Image (tube, grey):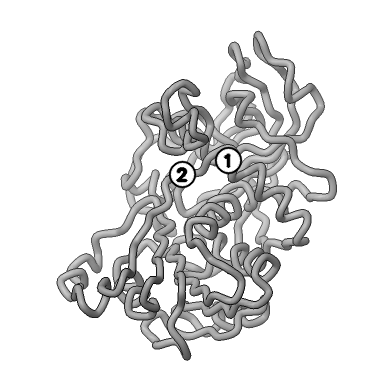
Amino acid sequence: MRAMILEKLGPVTPDSEPLRLAALPDPEPGPGQVLIRVHACGVCHTELDEIEGRTPPPRLPVVLGHQVVGEVVGQGEGVASPALGVRVGVGWIGGACGKCARCRWGLENLCADFIATGRDIDGGYAELMTVDARYAHPVPEGLDDVQTAPLLCAGAVGWRALRLCGLENGMRLGLTGFGGSGHLVLQLAKHLYPGSEIFVFARSEQTREFARKLGADWAGDTAEAPPALCDAIIDTTPAWTPVLKALEALAPGGRLVINAIAKEAGDRDVLADLDYSTHLWREREIKTVANVAGRDIREFLELARAAEIQPEVEVFDPADANWALVALKAGGVRGAKVLRVG
């Protein structure tokens, strides 16, 4: 099979080309696994975190990619479902022990033996991949392959972040950073909370205009004060400055949910300006999102179909995955980026 493989870590730049097109042996499904022929795979900011060493893979080379849509073409020992020929989606969670307390509570995203697709096991930047059958989720009818790919991570983790906000209809939601996840959360929030105002904080006017087009009630710069305080804010940026600014825009009793796998060190010194009275007092709180559980993916796929969520998608050839990563880092492509593999 053909695959784009990561062989060494380092900065993603227009000249770095961290991924290389290679011919690899076709994988074989082991016990409890399915073999998937990949149709499409989303490109996620987490891949930048992997390549640049903030969440490095435990081994190299590795095949990245954890927003995978494809068809089940093989089953390992003991697998009856999903059946051969079923179209499935695979997200960041590729496995968990299934036995610990957190797994039993439905929090397998916090399992000590959590397995990340495209980091701990080979992912979807390839023509074929294998994964634990428990985490190959049937894709509802009516969802397109390319359109579905971003739903499996940007959408599912966005849904988890939205749940963690504890929002009720009529409460005000803020979104700091408006990329692949934010533009899906906005659409879902408009569907679930029709009486709520949604404010978007983003650096570029082009991004802010995109947010208004999707229904944002207000869009301003990251450092700009909104017209009213928010009851909950979701931060999807890789920086620290938006965290401080979000806390300043949070109402008493409000919650900031940080939906990022890592924060870059570049602006860490702004945390010296954290003031208890200004940023945290009056029962403001901070919660973080860690990975996704299988429930998040299954629920969000059904919600996306019901809400008719349409990701803004830019399609790339797998051989152009390096350029997709550069564009993602530069913020030059709005919405989500997807490799059309098959």
The quarter holding residue 285 reads bottom left
Q: Is residue 125 above or below residue 313?
A: above
Q: Position of residue 341 (x, y in %)?
A: 69, 41
Q: Residue at x 64, y 26 (%)?
A: 1
Pick the residue in front: 247 or 9. Answer: 247
The amino acid on which the numbered mark 1 sits, given as a three-letter code, is Gly
Q: Is residue 323 visible?
A: no
Pick the residue in front: 70 or 234. Answer: 234
Q: Quadrant of the C terminus?
A: top right
The amino acid on which the numbered mark 2 sits, given as a three-letter code, is Asn
Say the numbered circle drawn on residue 291.
Answer: 2
Alpha carbons under labels 1 and 2: distance apart: 10 Å
Instruction: Pick out the residue farthest to the bottom.
Output: 227
Say the numbered circle drawn on residue 91.
Answer: 1
Would residue 309 be found to the left or right of residue 93 on screen? right
Q: Residue at x 67, y 61 (%)?
A: 313
Q: Residue at x 63, y 52 (%)?
A: 150
Asked whether the beta carbons under mark 1 and mark 2 sit within 8 Å of each other, the answer is no
Q: Position of residue 131 (x, y in %)?
A: 59, 26
Instruction: Pick out the residue farthest to the left.
Output: 272
Dot placed on the residue nearer the N-terminal end, 1 or 2? 1
Mark in front: 1 vs 2: 2
Q: Secondary structure at mark 1?
A: loop
The quarter holding residue 308 reads bottom right
Q: Is residue 116 visible?
A: yes
Instruction: Pick out the residue farthest to the top.
Output: 77
